[in-house]
Image (spheres, rainbow, N blue to C red):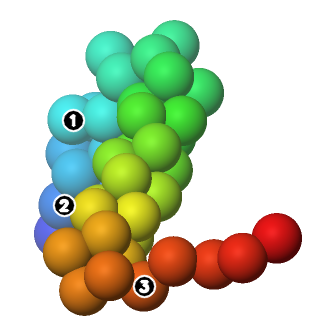
């Protein structure tokens, strides 16, 4: 029973974030892509199209 209560409290932390979930997901994706491109630029890895 205590374990179930801990799970509910853990989920309660993210309830106010729920409306902003698409924004946060998009921001996180953009950050990962930007870091990947920065890493490629610093190592002079350029792709020819």
Q: Is residue 19 left or right of residue 39?
A: right
Callout 1 environment at 10 Å: few (<14), some (14 to 19), or many (20+)? Answer: few
Q: Is residue 4 above or below residue 29?
A: below
CA gap between label 1 and label 3 equals 41 Å
Residue at left offset 18%, top offset 61%: 6
Of callouts 3 and 2, the N-terminal one: 2
In-front residue for pair 44/17: 44
**Disc 2 marks which residue?**
6
CA gap between label 3 and label 2 equals 47 Å
Q: Is residue 9 above or below residue 4?
A: above
In-front residue for pair 6/25: 25
Of callouts 2 and 1, the N-terminal one: 2
- Local SS, label 3: loop
Q: Position of residue 16 (x, y in %)?
A: 32, 16
**Disc 1 marks which residue?**
13
Q: What numbered label is drawn on residue 45? A: 3
Nearer to us of marks 3 and 2 is 3
Q: On the image, which quarter does residue 26 sit in?
A: top right
């Amino acid at each position: 029973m205590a374990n179930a209560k801990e799970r509910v409290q853990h989920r309660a932390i993210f309830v106010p974030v729920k409306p902003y979930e698409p924004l946060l997901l998009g921001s996180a994706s953009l950050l990962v892509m930007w870091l990947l491109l920065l890493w490629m630029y610093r190592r002079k890895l350029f792709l020819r199209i």
